[in-house]
Amino acid sequence: MLLSGKGVALVTGASGLLGTKLVPQLVRRGWRVVAIYNTHRPNYGLTQANVKLVKLDIRNRVKLEDLILKTMPEVVIHAAALTNVDLCEKDKTLAWEVNVEATKSVVRASRVVKAHLIYVSTDYVFDGERGLYKESDIPSPINYYGMTKLIAEELVRSADILYTIVRTSAIYGVGGSKKSFAEYVAERVTRGEKVKALTDQYLSPIYNADLAEAIAEASTLKPMGTYHVAGERVSRFEFAVKIAEALDARKDLIMPAKMDDMKSWVARRPRDSSLDVSKAREIIGAGIKPLDDAVRRFASEWLGR
């Protein structure tokens, strides 16, 4: 039996890097959660009394819409996406089905049940020519992944629904269905192996627990509009060094590299897609933490996993 609480929150991408932290956050705040996953069944390490797990490929639009209509959630958090940038470039049909068509279904069903939709987007909607982008800056994606996410944003904005768009950057942490950059660095440096990291690509990495806290807060506040929720601006090289430091590993294992060296990339990447988080810090407040603090908590979690 589901416990009483604020209402029902439906989460797509519930086994992802964000979803694994977001679902427990919502439960702790009193939400009953319908958690959608595709291939990796999540284990949140908590009582399942307030969580209903649903295995569903979000490309199945009929089943996805039917689930939302039957569940009648107060909040829908659409976090599922195809985030592999090179795969999006190679398989544009798959990227469109997952990132655009599924979002159409989420928007349509959310409108019918009058749910507040929180759509999780990306810094890759920007071209990376300037950095520290504000919500008012005009997007200009340079790869297909960024384009599909921007189109999905416009689907959300143009619909007759209450919505919050959360743009974020380089989510890292422990527990997702695929390995984050921070985990890759941690694995290699703790084994004494070298890691190449880019000195000329800047981003705003955010710890998955912090992003989950911010989105859980937004689920309660329901602020309208677009918000940048991310960490501090840093190069991938600087970020990797901070991870090594937090793990008491050798910093000299982090080897500098340039974006031009990345011959295996299929899609272009922005050089500086860092985000200005002033608006989110003022309105949402929660989840935006200092980088050093977040990296220390990541290292502690990674070592204790």
Image (cartoon, rainbow, N blue to C red):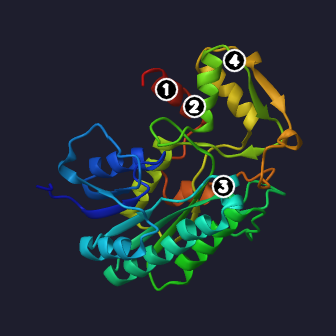
Type of the residue with mark 1 = Trp
Do the CB atoms of the residues marked 2 and 4 lie less than 8 Å apart?
no
Type of the residue with mark 3 = Leu
Q: Which mark is residue 193?
A: 4
Residue 151 appears in the figure: yes
Total marks in image:
4
Do the CB atoms of the residues marked 4 and 1 lie less than 8 Å apart?
no
Instruction: Return the residue at label 3.
Output: 87
**Depth order, front residue of 29/79:** 79
Which is closer to the viewer, label 2 or label 3? 3
Of callouts 3 and 1, which one flags the residue occurring earlier in the amino acid sequence? 3
Instruction: Return the residue at label 2.
Output: 183
Residue drawn at x 57%, y 54% as measured from the top left: 229
- The x, y position of residue 218, in whole percent, is 43, 60
Corner quadrant of residue 74: bottom left
Instruction: Return the residue at label 1.
Output: 302
Q: Secondary structure at mark 3?
A: helix
Mark 3 → mark 1, Cα distance in angstroms: 27 Å
* Mark 4 surroundings within 10 Å by alpha-carbon count, few (fewer than 14), some (14 through 19), many (20 or more): few
Residue drawn at x 47%, y 43% as measured from the top left: 177
Residue 177 sits above or below residue 97 on the image? above
